Image (spheres, rainbow, N blue to C red):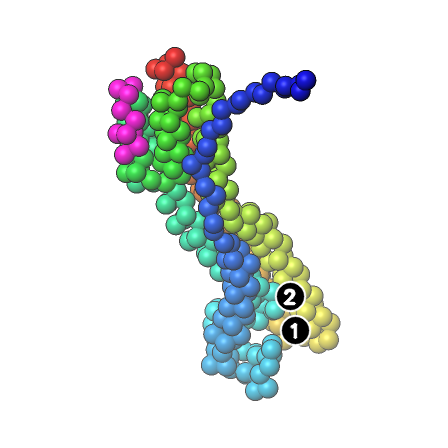
Amino acid sequence: MAETKPTATAAKTSTSVQPKKSGNSISWVAPLLCILSGYLIWRFIIGSSDNFTHPDPSGGFWPSHEGAKGSFARMYQGGIIVPVLIGCFLTVLTFVIERFLTISKATGTGNIAEFIRKVQYNLANKNVDAAISECDKQKGSVGNVMKAGLRKYKEMISSTELDTDQKVLAIQKEVEEATALELPMLEKNLVFLSTIASVATLLGLLGTVMGMIRSFSALGDSGGGEAAQKLSQGISEALYNTALGIGTSAISIIMYNIFTTKIDGITYGIDESGFTLTQSFASLYK
């Protein structure tokens, strides 16, 4: 006689959350282009022959121009670290613009707290479709997560296969999956700002040290009042590296903190959205 085995049936819930396909080629293309642009600015704009009384006619990768006509031209004589620092500054500007546009879009079109209150009001009146419409108006990361959760919320209302606790867990899982797709997009490329904030200062100090070495080496090869004048000029040129490094680092730190604060606000809104959905369903559909 054939032996029969009991079969257990488990209700499966589908998810409406789909992974976002987005490349991040800017993360490696932008720094390279910015460093190249930094060299071109240093070599052909700052280092233009018109900016010096004794330009180097041979040209080349690093012409030895002398007699800078102004403060802008003296930056050229700060050395080969200057174009790298200019490239770092351009990289910071690039990612500041990129993150500003991305985070502004993720914030949505209205106040997050007000949006959550409207959704709570509609859910309290058991008007899920109106709550979804609010998500379409709000957009942004909080709106996307809330909309994904509301779709599952609506699905669970009519479901008869699961009990209340299982339905709440299904809604919570949907919110977590949507959140997992939204948060990486917000934090992407911030690592460049935090890295440059530290590296730019060190590069500036490196350029200053290299300039000081050249200045004191020139002092040792000559003497008299002319040597002292060249030494002071060399130190002044070397300090351009420090100024560029500190300025770039300061901008990076400030913008990094601004962006992380905005991201924290969005994250808090997402967490509050998940809490709103689960608590509302648990209280209204026992």
Left or right side of 138 for 259: right
Crowding at mark 2 (Cα within 10 Å: few <14, some 14-19, many 20+): many
Q: Quadrant of the C terminus?
A: top left
27 in relation to 127, above or below? below
The magenta-colored residue range is 124-133
Position in image of residue 152 (x %, y %): 40, 29
The image quarter in which residue 233 lies: bottom right
- Asked whether residue 269 appears in the rendered view, the answer is no
Under circle 2, the secondary element is helix
The image quarter in which residue 211 lies: bottom right
Position in image of residue 277 (x %, y %): 39, 24
Could you tell me which residue is drawn at 45 percent across and 16 percent down?
163
Residue 125 in the magenta stretch? The answer is: yes
Q: Which residue is mark 2?
A: 211
Could you tell me which residue is drawn at 44 percent across and 26 percent down?
171
Depth check: give the residue in front, 241 or 231.
Answer: 241
Could you tell me which residue is drawn at 50 percent across and 57 percent down?
26
Q: Which numbered dot is residue 227?
A: 1
Depth check: give the residue in front, 47 or 30.
Answer: 30
What kind of residue is marked 1?
Ala
The image quarter in which residue 167 lies: top left
277 in relation to 182, above or below? above
Left or right side of 220 for 40: left
Depth check: give the residue in front, 5 or 102.
Answer: 5
